[in-house]
Structures are given as C-alpha cells and as structure tokens.
Amino acid sequence: MDNIRLGLLGYGTVGSGVAQILEQNTEDIETRTDAKIKIKSVLVRDLTKPRDQHGDFRFTDQSEAVLHDPEIDIIVEVMGGIEPARTYIHEALRHGKNVVTANKDLLALHGEELFEAAKASGKDLYFEASVAGGIPIIAVLKQSLAANRITGLIGIINGTTNYILTAMSNEHRGYQEVLSEAQKLGYAESDPSSDVDGLDAARKLAILASLAFNSRVTLPDVFVEGISHITREDLEYAEELGYTIKLLAIAKHQDEGVEVRVHPAFLPKSHPLASVNGVYNAIFVVGDAVGETMFYGRGAGSLPTGSAVVSDIIQVTRNIQANSTSAISCTCYHNLPVKASQDFTTAYYVRLLVKDEPRVLATLALLFAEANISFASIIQKPRGHEQAEIVLVTHPCRESQLQEALDSVKAYSKVLKVYNVIRFEIGNE
Ligand code: NAP
Ligand code: HSE
C-alpha cells in the first residue's frame, strides 16, 4: 500500500470538511486507492483558535513547514484569496508537489499562469471544488462531455444568493436576516459582498466557460450584476407572471464569440432550474451530441465542498501511482472573442412609479417604440394618491436599445421612479 501525505493550507469550513471526510471514510478510500492518504500538517493563521481536529496532524503558522516538507505529496489549498495563495501554489509546484485547490478567485484571474506552472513542473493542479461545491461539474466538462461541442450552459452557482432569493420568495423573509443566516451556515464568502454582488458566480462562470468552450475566459470578461436590488415586490410580480427570479450564470457560444454574464433573471417556472432552491446549485449544460443535461447538488458548505476536494485528492493519488501526473493540462486551445454587453439580447421587466394620468401609458409605449421595442405584457396597479405602479415586460431586444428607451423614460416628467429593470432568461441554452 502506498503512503500519500497531504499538506493543507487552511482549516476553515472546507479544510475541516476535508479532514472529516478523510477520517470518516478512511477504510473505503484506502481500499479504492490502495493508498494510505493522511494529512501531515496544516497551515493556519491563528494557532490559538479552538478547532475540531479530525486526524493525527499538526497545525503550523509557518508556510515553509508545509510547502518545503519533502514527505508531502499533495498540497491542498483551501485558504482562499489571491495572495499569499498564488505564491504558495507556485512554491508548492516548484517543490515538486501536486496541488488541489478550491480557490475560484485565484483561478478566475490567474488560471492560465498556474496551469502553465503545473505543466512545466509535471505536476497536477486539480480544482473540482472551485465551482458549485459538491457537484462534480469540472470532471463533467473536462471528461464526461469531452465528446461534445458545448453550445451553452446556465447555472445557479452561488449557494448564498440562491438561499437568500428562495427564503425571500417562499418564506417572505427579509434580505439582511437571510444573509446573516447564510453566513452562520458557512455558505457565504469571508466578504459576503462577493456573493450578493455576483462576483463569486462570475468567477465560477469564468472557469466553467473556459472549460466548456476551450477558450480562456477571465473574471473581467464576465458581465456582472448582483441581487441586492431585488425586492419582495419584484419576487411577487415574478410569481404573478409565472416566473421565479434566480441569480443566473449564463455562457453561450455564438457565431460572434462567447457571451458570459451573471445577473438576476426571470426564469419560467417550467424551466428545470426554477425548482433549484436554497443552498442547492445546478448547472444546465447543452452539448451538440448529448443534448440537454443538468447537474444538481449542494453548492457550498463544509462536507459537500470537502467531497469535491477529497475526490481530487483521490484522483491525484491515482495519477501519482500511475506515474501520470500532468496528463490533462490546460484545454484552452481557442482564442474566441467575448461579446460586448450592449449586444446581449433578452426580454426585460421594467417596474415604474408614474403619475396616474391620461396618455402616460401611451407615451411610455411611444418612448419604447422609438427604440424599436414592443411590449409582451403590461400590469398596472393603483398606488396612493393619483399614482400607479406599472410593470412593462418587453419582447427581446438588444441591451443598447433598452438603454436608449430607459434614458427617455427617466427624462419623462410623469415617471416618478424607475424601481427596477430585470432581464428574462427563457431559452434552454
Ligand atoms: P474559511 O472558513 O475562511 O477558512 C480559511 C482558512 O484558511 C482558515 O483556517 C484560515 O486560518 C486559513 N488562512 C487564511 N488566510 C491565511 C493565511 N494568509 N495564512 C495562513 N492561513 C490562512 O474559508 P473556506 O470557506 O473554508 O474557503 C476556503 C476556500 O474554498 C476559498 O477559496 C473559498 O472560496 C473556497 N470554497 C468555499 C466553499 C464554502 O462553502 N465555504 C465552497 C467552495 C469553495 P484561521 O483558521 O487561523 O483563520
Ligand atoms: N460562497 C459560495 C456560495 C461558496 O455561496 O456558493 C461556494 O463556492
């Protein structure tokens, strides 16, 4: 039986989950791999913090004690952030270690550089846990769907925001209260604005789109809008119209290039993603051969994310045993252009407060018509003294047309407030 020694960088939500899984499933993992996989040392910031220790290893606050230890075969980076994680991964590869990471922040910005470094050192760099927690979507895109040309994918890939939107919609609870709960449950990033502003999903989408379309997509390529402007009123209108609002991560491979965007969207209740609730994530992937597929599971949390990290550790162990590390390196062999946001085409929900007077609705129709936009449906409700709330649902139009119409609407004196503008996602890819 082989001995595989691990060095963990970090022992928070994910790191402790990794240790717990290795401890509770030791026998099965040993039998499956014919290897004793043990954590030798763990780097943390604060040695005085009380911790649940799963296994026989030592904590240290000295990075060299882990990165330079000749007995360690695999470094598991579960500390997060860009620095010092980036430097530590380079250092680990230079010292002949294979690396497993859950760090989407790092890969979405510096993936190319890190994969090149892994290739140059002949070592593995695995990253299953970086997207969608426990769902093995990286293996799906790299291997299981490798026969296909992927035409598009839509994901709910941030557990925190899905948890918030589900509780606001189904339990009519307040945004701030539910966010605090998601933080306590270990779902949110250390800075939860990454979740609610859409950046966490955008980082994951950059990783998914790079794999799906074999063309490097980085965080700045992704159009991002978060959920903090979504109100209970919007969720109630969605219900009335037969939709639900989800934070979607959308990637499409089109003739003009790659379209990558993260934003809240009205999704028909009949869409398979509409029933993905709470901390659950799902990714709907369309391939030219396989057709529509969907992958579902817990997108965050200690054990689900630990499951993805440990599966990487097992695969790297097998590669070490077969002397085949670095066999699958960077798969970005295209260099596709990224579509500008003004060219995105979607239908829109526009919610306004207006003066309840003759010709106001007719004028609004005219202002949209001037931008060549027509309406699919209109809802009007009385609001207080001689005011009305109007919800306009447009037919699909380009983002630039919508902006042109909104500029005119905002300048129209009978419009008292533009509450919200939210896109629709209707198609299946
Ligand atoms: P976390 O709970 O905040 O834990 C981070 C750990 O790293 C802590 O043990 C911390 O030490 C240690 N650490 C941080 N900076 C350090 C430094 N400069 N030097 C030494 N140790 C340092 O984070 P997490 O939720 O486990 O997330 C870890 C990674 O997994 C992140 O990249 C995250 O995006 C990713 N991820 C998380 C989830 C999830 O559900 N939480 C899911 C998928 C991916 P102390 O304990 O001493 O503070
Ligand atoms: N904060 C992330 C989420 C953790 O809520 O999805 C998993 O990457």
Image (cartoon, rainbow, N blue to C red):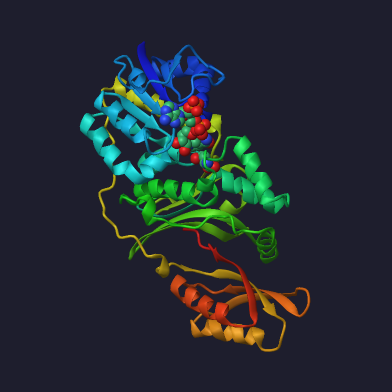
Question: In the picture shown, does residue 195 fall above or below 136?
Answer: below
Outermost residue toward the left in this view: 120
Residue 84 appears left or right of 375:
left
Residue 390, placed above or below residue 26: below
Question: In the picture, residue 381 is in which quadrant?
Answer: bottom right
Give the farthest residue toward the bottom: 359
User: Could you tell me which residue is drawn at 56 percent across and 60 percent down?
Assistant: 265
The one of 306 and 114 positioned closer to us in this rendering: 114
Q: Is residue 134 visible?
A: no
Compare residues 328 and 94 and report the one nearer the observer.
Answer: 94
Point out the residue furthest to the right here. Answer: 385
Residue 115: in sight, yes or no? yes
Quadrant of residue 385 within the rendered picture: bottom right
Which of 30/117 is in front?
117
Q: Residue at x 59, y 48 (%)?
A: 162
- Work out which quarter of the rendered image holds the N terminus and state it: top left
**Image location of residue 253, percent across then percent down:** 37, 59
Residue 38 spot, x, y in % from top left: 42, 15
* 235 w.r.t. 183: above or below: below
In the displayed structure, 400 sits above or below 188; it is below
Q: Position of residue 137 (x, y in %)?
A: 44, 41
Q: Quadrant of residue 392?
A: bottom right
Residue at point 29% right, 36% down? Answer: 328
